Amino acid sequence: MEMIEQLPLPVQLADSATFDNFFQDRASEVIACLKQQVAAPTGWGITYLWGGRGSGKSHLLQAVCHLCTEEDHPASYIPLSIATLNPSILENLGDDRVVCIDDLDSVAGDPLWEEGLMGLLERARYGGGVVISAARAAPAGIGFKLPDLISRFGSQSVYQLHDMDDEARMAAFRQRAGRRGLDLSGEVVRYVLNRYQRDTHALFGLLERLDHASLVAKRRLTIPFLKQLEENPPAASSHPKG
C-alpha cells in the first residue's frame, strides 16, 4: 500500500482503490471531473462528493491520490473519522497540489475544525490547489456552523453518489473478483448477496477474505465451499445476515 508521508500517522491508500477498479456506471461525470482536476497543472478547485456508506466516496478520494502519485503531483488523503487527528494537521499539508478530505461529517459543528477547514480552503484558493472532500450528506446537511463553509464547499462541483442496486452489486462483485483472477458463477454471486451484507464496502472486504481462504484451501469458490466456510469461518470473516 502507498503511504501518505506528510501525515504524522500511518494513513494508507488501499491498493484496490483505483479508478480502473471502480464500478459505478452512473459516476462517469464525477470520475471525469476528478481526473481533470489531477491533470490540470494550474488553477484551484473544490469538489464535494456525498452519499451513503458503500457509495464509493472513499474509494474515489483514494483513487485521486493514486493518480496523483502516477502524475508526480503531491497529494494528501485525510480521513477525519480518525479520532486522534486534530485541526493542526490541516496546517501541515505543505505544498500539496491536491488535498482529499474524507468523512467531513465527523468534524462538522466543531469550531476549531471548521476554522481549520476555512483556512485550508483559503490557502488552496490563493495557492492554486485542489480540495476534494466527501461526506454522507450535502454541504448544507452535515451540521456546519459557519455559513461561509457551507457556501464554499457547495460553490463549485458537488456530486451525489448513489447506492448500487442488486444487479449493479452483482456486476461489481464479479468485476472485482475477476481482477483477482476469480471466475465466479452467477449462482455463487447471488448466494453471497443473499447471505451477506449488501454494503459494497463489506462485500469487497468479504471478497478479499474469500480469495485468501480459497488460496489456502486450494479450492474454487463454490457454494459448497462457502457453506463450509460459514460452518468454520476464517478469522475476521464477515458474518452472514440473520
Image: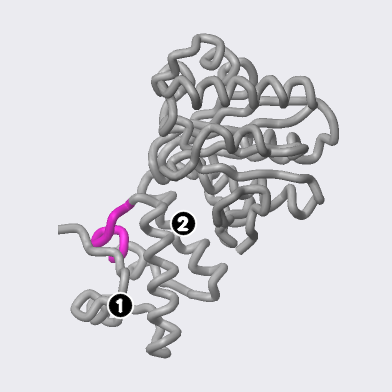
In this rendering, position of residue 178 left or right of residue 156:
left
Which residue is located at x 49 percent, y 29 percent? 160
Q: Which residues are magenta?
A: 191-198
Q: Position of residue 6 (x, y in %)?
A: 67, 48
Is 187 contained in the magenta span?
no
Dividing the image into 4 quarters, which one contains the C terminus?
bottom left
Badge 2 amino acid: Ala
Camera-nearest label, 1 or 2: 1
Q: Position of residue 50 (x, y in %)?
A: 48, 31
Q: Is residue 170 above or below residue 220?
A: above
Q: Position of residue 86 (x, y in %)?
A: 50, 36
Residue extending furthest toward the left: 242
- Quadrant in the rendering for residue 216: bottom left
User: What predominant SS class does the magenta segment belong to?
Assistant: helix
List the residue tagged with mark 1. Answer: 234
Residue extending furthest toward the bottom: 218
Rate crowding at label 2 as few (under 14), some (14 to 19) or many (20 or more) other CA atoms within 10 Å: some
Is residue 93 visible from the viewing direction of this image?
A: yes
Q: Is residue 61 above or below residue 210?
A: above
List the residue tagged with mark 2. Answer: 171
